[in-house]
Image (cartoon, rainbow, N blue to C red):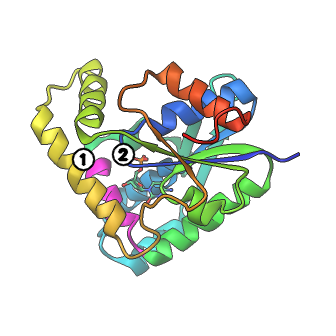
Amino acid sequence: MRVKIAIDGPAGAGKSTIARLLAKRLGLRYLDTGAMYRALTLAALQRGVPCSDEEALLRVATSMDLKIVFEQETKSNLIYLDGEDVTFLIRQPEVNANVSLVSSHKKVRDFIAALQKEIGRQGSIVMDGRDIGTVVMPDANWKIFLQASVGERARRRMREMQRNGHDVDILELEEQIRQRDHLDSTRENSPLRKAEDAIEVDTTHLSIEDVVDKVLAIIRGADRDV
Ligand code: DC
């Protein structure tokens, strides 16, 4: 049987960490769909294409050589753009600042979602993103919507940035998260929203292991009424 698991939710709710660990525990492939929007944003920045220009972005999307390597052992995704490993480059602040705008264009979303659907058709998978349960894999066997308070998401982001040697202001981070939530959930094209048949899990007071256990319990049918 083909297993498809959709993990959606706002920035900082723990989607990629949880989705990757789930893929590991269940022996499935994992796809970080945000990385594809990030790679396109990086390509646009490198080519000097304005992130507001939908047609030009589509030309970048159709001409870039994007490769995703599924790491068996760690379940991470290695991202190659035009032959170069950009796995780390796509996390830089300039990409963070532009990716919401890039991913708001309909033609861009249709193009990237078609690639993601094709990857979904190739076999069992855990995908995380914003529109996986609603658009990319509406037929997923399980749809999980991860949520967490803005304060907790800002604290997680702060710890991550501090580990990478950045000095950050927690209030500024909270503001950025609020803005990104607003952009992602009010955009016209496939906004962030919980699929009707998704199960919501609030991770605010849970450790990573607790969340993974909870989602595994849902998948194994022991806990349908979260
Ligand atoms: O999950 P992330 O922070 O790497 O996502 C980067 C951006 O891409 C984020 O602003 C929302 C967008 N995105 C999206 O619109 N749809 C997805 N399936 C994944 C990400």
Left or right of 211 on screen, residue 23: right
Measuring from the top left, give residue 34's x and y in whole percent. Answer: 47, 50
- Which residue is the site of mark 1? 177
- SS category of the residue bearing label 2: loop
Measuring from the top left, give residue 112's x and y in whole percent. Answer: 56, 64
Does the beta carbon of the residue at mark 2 sit less than 8 Å from ligand 1?
yes
Q: Is disc 1 in contact with disc 2, using a CB cutoff of under 8 Å?
A: yes
- Which residue is the site of mark 2? 11
Q: Which residues are magenta?
A: 95-105
Q: Considering depth in this image, is 40 or 113 the residue closer to the camera?
A: 113
Is residue 99 one of those drawn in magenta? yes
Amino acid found under the numbered disc labelled 2: Ala
Image quadrant for the C terminus? top right
Measuring from the top left, give residue 63's x and y in whole percent. Answer: 55, 67
| Mark 1 Cα shell of 10 Å, populated few (<14), some (14-19), many (≥20) | many
Compare marks 1 and 2 and give the one earlier in the sequence: 2
**In the figure, 218 relative to 130: above or below?**
above
Residue drawn at the location 51% of the way across and 28% of the way down: 211
Main SS, magenta region, reads helix
Residue 105 in sight in this render: yes
**In the figure, 71 relative to 196: above or below?**
above
- SS category of the residue bearing label 1: helix
Is residue 170 one of those drawn in magenta? no
Residue drawn at the location 54% of the way across and 61% of the way down: 64
Left or right of 57 on screen, residue 79: right
Residue drawn at the location 55% of the way across and 73% of the way down: 110
| Mark 2 Cα shell of 10 Å, populated few (<14), some (14-19), many (≥20) | many
**In the figure, 199 relative to 155: above or below?**
below
Q: Considering depth in this image, is 133 or 56 the residue closer to the camera?
A: 133
